[in-house]
Amino acid sequence: MTEYDYDLLVIGSGPGGQSAALQAASLGKRVGLIERKPYLGGVSLQTGTIPSKALREAAYLASRFSSRGMRDAMQVHGQQHSGFLSEAVGRKQAVIDRHERMLLNQLMSHGVTLLPGEAGFADAHTVNLHSSSGEAVQLSAAVIVLATGSRPRRPADVPFDRERVLDSTSILKMTRLPRRLTIIGGGVIACEFATIFAPLGVAVSLVDSHDHLLAYLDEDIQQILENDLLDMGVQLHMKTRIKGIERQGEQVQLETGSDVKLETDVVLYALGREPNYDSLDLAAAGLAADDHGWVRINAQHQTTRQHIYIIGDLAGRPSLASTAMEQGRLAVNHAFDRDHVEPAGQLPMAIYTIPELSYVGKTERELQDQGADYVVGRARFSESARGQIIGEERGFMKLLVDRSSRKLLGVHIIGESASELVHIGLLAMNCGAGVDLLANTVYNYPTLAHCYKSAALDCLQQLQA
């Protein structure tokens, strides 16, 4: 047998890379983890998930302090909204530093070798590792996992300058609030940042070419989100395309397809992400990207070189930290023939707008396209005691249930703690449980989780009728 330097080399230290390295180390494998940045954690920890959620927390507090319910009685300790941003930036960095230390200790305690530098294939089992000092070494491995993530798409005709024209990475480095912010895009990142900055007093405009935001969601969920955005003062320019972006001094001019010009202080361009393949030299390993710029993989995340796996953002949708971690674990188990099982059923999705939005399973649109026979159970947070206590007026839960089997087909939630609440429905679906289980379960009271009982009873009334 060929003797390799490592049993497993992982390129990229984001959630997927961490999970793959730790899983292989727990199996007694010799593991090397390569990271080209001077810090661990990848986009998720350093420039994406964690930083943006820290900023969201400040915006959420600002929105609640000026909102409904008993929380009106709380005080902001004399801080203006601009103070929230400064505090959030400091808290963001503290969270990042603490999590990075925890990750470093975890990897080292498991015996994972950390390898700083930029990696590129020399052949299918060997990578060239270039350090920041210019030195290069070759490392070989029986199995290689690529987890180098993605980056914001930056078209050549958009004049990014890290000051007035920003992407989703550079906007996280702002320390002062702009007076006006225009966001180009209507997807997850665009909607999340719109609801971060609007509660902080920024005049936010959102420009998108589609009829509705997050077009894959059901209409009732879309409508609640759009109404909340409008209540925050966000101006929605739907069915609008941007033809040109030009910085003029301290302002930025946007020209639309209808020749209407928009002026703003800062632009956030949030239209898609692209894979970080650039430095990997895929051809040397016998790999090639398709016409859309992605390397094809099978259900086990293997490339055509079966010992090379691709996980996380680099594997494409759903591009979630949670799925990346599971992909890393499953890829390693598959590579070393250990406990290879498929993921436990459905994958939950969460969008950290204000309000939160989360779902699992089918949408009504998908069920209608399939001709499914189903019923819908609804519960409004405003009709629950907990919802009234916290002043949650628009929160909403929807259960989609098959009429004949009574099994859950989908759970959709918008409102406070939606990303947490969805897991109750997720577990029920993964266990093959029906709506009767949710209806007969006793929930703490008052809680938002009690809405599951209300929505389930709504379903049962329709089923009995």
Image: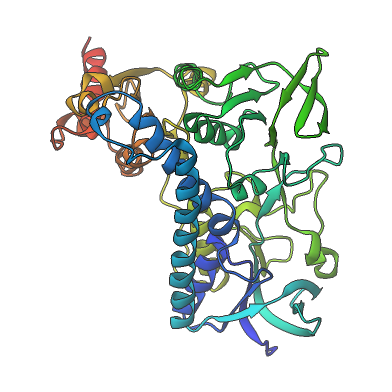
Image quarter where the N terminus lies is bottom right
Q: Residue at x 25, y 16 (%)?
A: 463
Please give left or right for residue 84 compared with residue 449 in the image: right
Q: Quadrant of residue 278?
A: bottom right
State the residue in front, 49 or 198.
198
In this rendering, the answer to whether 214 lies above or below 85 is above
Q: Residue at x 51, y 75 (%)?
A: 24
Please give left or right for residue 401 compared with residue 8 in the image: left
Residue 346 in view here: no
Residue 229 in view here: yes
Residue 313 x %, y %: 62, 52
Q: Quadrant of residue 317?
A: top right
In this rendering, the answer to whether 272 lies above or below 362 is below
Residue 408 x %, y %: 34, 31
Q: Residue at x 58, y 43 (%)?
A: 176
Please give left or right for residue 318 compared with residue 293 in the image: left
Q: Residue at x 58, y 38 (%)?
A: 177
State the residue in front, 35 or 254.
254
Residue 129 x %, y %: 75, 78
